[in-house]
Each structure stands twice: as structure tokens, then as C-alpha cells.
Image (cartoon, rainbow, N blue to C red):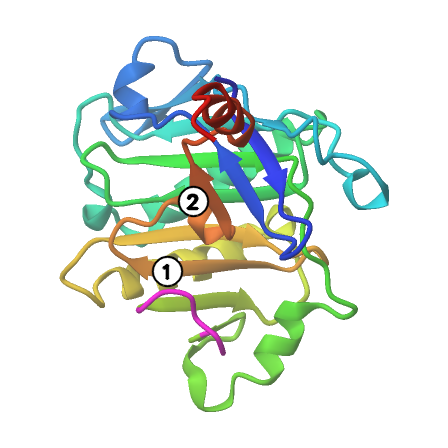
């Protein structure tokens, strides 16, 4: 079954109809890297994940979907060939290297029409890697920049402040532990210079020690081009962060199966 996005016309929320994929993505793709770069005493390897994610042929019509011409794209950026995760041991400088690498990957992919909804996550897997998703699902856009408004109205939810970034708990968090870190300037991730990325790396390093449990962190960008980084305790599905529900049930096949029982 091909993975397929569908839009609920009532709630305007997306569902991903998908086969449940088990196992480590980096281990499955080992030896098939499309890019390889030195890092520490190892190498960072980039694997393209061919998951056949595509918009639904049933609901993709009308003005709302004109920004969704592509099939989506996924790649894994693994910092070790071994099945291990050493992210908590990385220095601020090494985390900055990763942020620069992610920025370079996004710059390389910008020439292709892969979808404008971008999320890069790092979850507490046994094998440390970044999961980069570029999806054809349209962004929810507000009249004014949501991130700019959130920064101005953080008030008593503010928890950390630097010259360039503000960290706060979202007004309506969807998870028990959720922190947003956004640049005070209206800026996209691909526009960050090394100084900004070093500052962000320092915040990531500081916040990584907040919980004894591992954290999931995700880089997202709003429809207005203002990026933010979010931190969660435990392993969080990147699709769940994007508010995309998963199901393994294909509604058309289910309807046929029920009709074919001839018990109605």
C-alpha cells in the first residue's frame, strides 16, 4: 500500500494512511548513503528514505492544495554507522556543526519541489540520527506571524532568554513537556548565520540536561517563514508533532471489505 495523505474536510486535519514501518531506518539503509562527511572520528552519512509518501488523489483539489504538487521527501542524517546514540556527549561546537549540516542539506534540496512543510527531528532512538521530512501537506497560515505573536505574549510562560532567542512553554501545549525556542528576529532557519546557530546550539545543550529521560527535538518553520525549535521528553513521532494522524486502515479497502461480507 502506498502511503497517502488525506484531509478531513470537517476538522481540516490530515491523516496519513501508511504501512507500519518497524526497525531502525539508519541500519536498514547502511551502505546506501548518498552523501558522506567527516565528523569527529566517524562520518555523517545521509540516506534517502524511499517511502512513496504522496498526497491523496481523492481530496487534493481546489485552491487550498495548489502548494502541494510533490510527493514528499525523507532522508536520515546519521552521525554513526554503529547502532548507538551519543548526542548527550556532544559539545556545543559539535551540535553547531550539525545545525550547519542540516542548513546545508535544506539549501541543497531547495532546488527541488518537495513540499514546503519541513520538519527535522532527533528522537531518542538507539541509533542516533536526524530525520528530515519535506512534506506536500500545506501549512496552516495565520493572518500575522504566529511565532512573532507568541514571543511578544510569552509573559509568565517565558523560561529562558538570550540576545537572539526566547524559550517558552506554548500557550496550548499538546504534550506534557513541550518547550518552544524561537529567534526574536523574524528569520527562517536557512537564513541563520554561524553566530545564531552557535547560540542555538548552546541552548540545545543546556536544555538537553533538563530531564533524566532522553528528549526529542524538532526544527519547524511557520507559514510566515519564522522557524522554531521544539523540545519534548521521550520519543515523539514527527508526524504527531505536525498534527498529522497515522492509521494503517485504508477507508476504501475497509468499505469494500465490509460490503463483501454480505452480512448487511
Of the numbered discs 1 and 2, the one sitting upstream in the chain is 1
Furthest residue in direction top, as rendered = 31
Q: Is residue 60 shown in magenta?
A: no
Element at label 2? helix
Classify residue 127 by image quadrant: top left
Q: Which residue is drawn at 76% across and 70% down?
A: 144
Q: Which of 196 and 257 is in front in this view?
A: 257
Instruction: Say if 232 sits above or below 42 in the image.
Output: below
Residue 209, image x, y percentages: 21, 63
Residue 210, image x, y percentages: 22, 68
Q: Which residue is drawn at 38% across and 9% down?
A: 32
Query: Residue beneath label 1, please?
Result: 231
* Label at residue 238: 2
Question: Which secondary structure is most common in the magenta stretch?
Answer: loop
Pointer 1: residues within 10 angstroms few (<14), some, or many (20+)?
many
Classify residue 145 by image quadrant: bottom right
Instruction: Say if 93 sits above or below 157 in the image.
Output: above
Magenta region, residue range:
170-176
| Cα–Cα gap, marks 1 and 2 | 12 Å
Q: Nearer the viewer, residue 251 or 63?
A: 251
Q: Residue at x 13, y 62 (%)?
A: 212
Q: Residue at x 29, y 65 (%)?
A: 206
Amino acid at each position: 500500500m502506498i502511503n497517502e495523505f488525506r484531509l478531513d474536510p470537517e476538522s481540516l486535519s490530515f491523516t496519513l494512511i501508511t504501512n507500519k514501518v518497524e526497525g531502525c531506518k539508519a541500519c536498514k539503509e547502511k551502505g546506501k548513503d548518498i552523501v558522506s562527511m567527516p565528523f569527529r572520528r566517524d562520518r555523517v552519512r545521509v540516506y534517502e528514505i524511499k517511502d512513496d509518501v504522496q498526497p491523496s488523489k481523492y481530496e487534493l483539489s481546489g485552491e487550498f492544495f495548489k502548494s502541494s504538487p510533490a510527493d514528499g521527501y525523507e532522508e536520515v542524517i546519521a552521525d554513526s554507522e554503529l547502532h548507538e546514540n551519543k548526542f548527550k556527549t556532544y559539545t556545543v561546537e559539535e551540535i553547531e556543526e550539525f545545525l550547519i549540516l542540516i542548513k546545508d542539506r535544506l539549501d541543497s534540496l531547495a532546488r527541488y519541489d518537495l513540499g514546503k512543510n519541513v520538519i527535522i527531528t532527533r528522537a531518542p532512538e538507539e541509533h542516533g540520527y536526524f530525520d528530515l521530512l519535506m512534506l506536500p501537506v500545506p501549512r496552516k497560515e495565520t493572518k500575522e506571524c504566529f511565532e512573532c505573536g507568541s514571543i511578544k505574549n510569552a509573559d509568565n510562560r517565558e523560561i529562558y532568554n538570550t540576545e537572539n532567542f526566547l524559550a517558552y512553554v506554548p500557550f496550548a501545549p499538546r504534550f506534557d513537556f513541550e518547550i518552544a525556542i524561537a529567534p526574536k528576529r523574524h528569520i527562517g532557519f536557512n537564513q541563520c548565520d554561524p553566530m545564531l546557530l552557535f547560540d542555538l546550539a548552546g541552548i540545545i545543550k543546556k536544555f538537553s540536561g533538563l530531564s533524566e529521560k532522553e528528549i526529542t527535538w524538532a526544527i519547524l518553520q511557520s507559514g510566515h517563514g519564522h522557524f522554531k525549535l521544539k523540545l519534548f521528553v521521550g520519543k515523539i513521532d514527527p508526524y504527531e508533532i505536525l498534527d498529522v494522524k497515522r492509521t494503517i486502515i485504508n477507508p476504501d479497502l475497509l468499505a469494500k471489505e465490509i460490503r463483501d461480507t454480505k452480512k448487511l
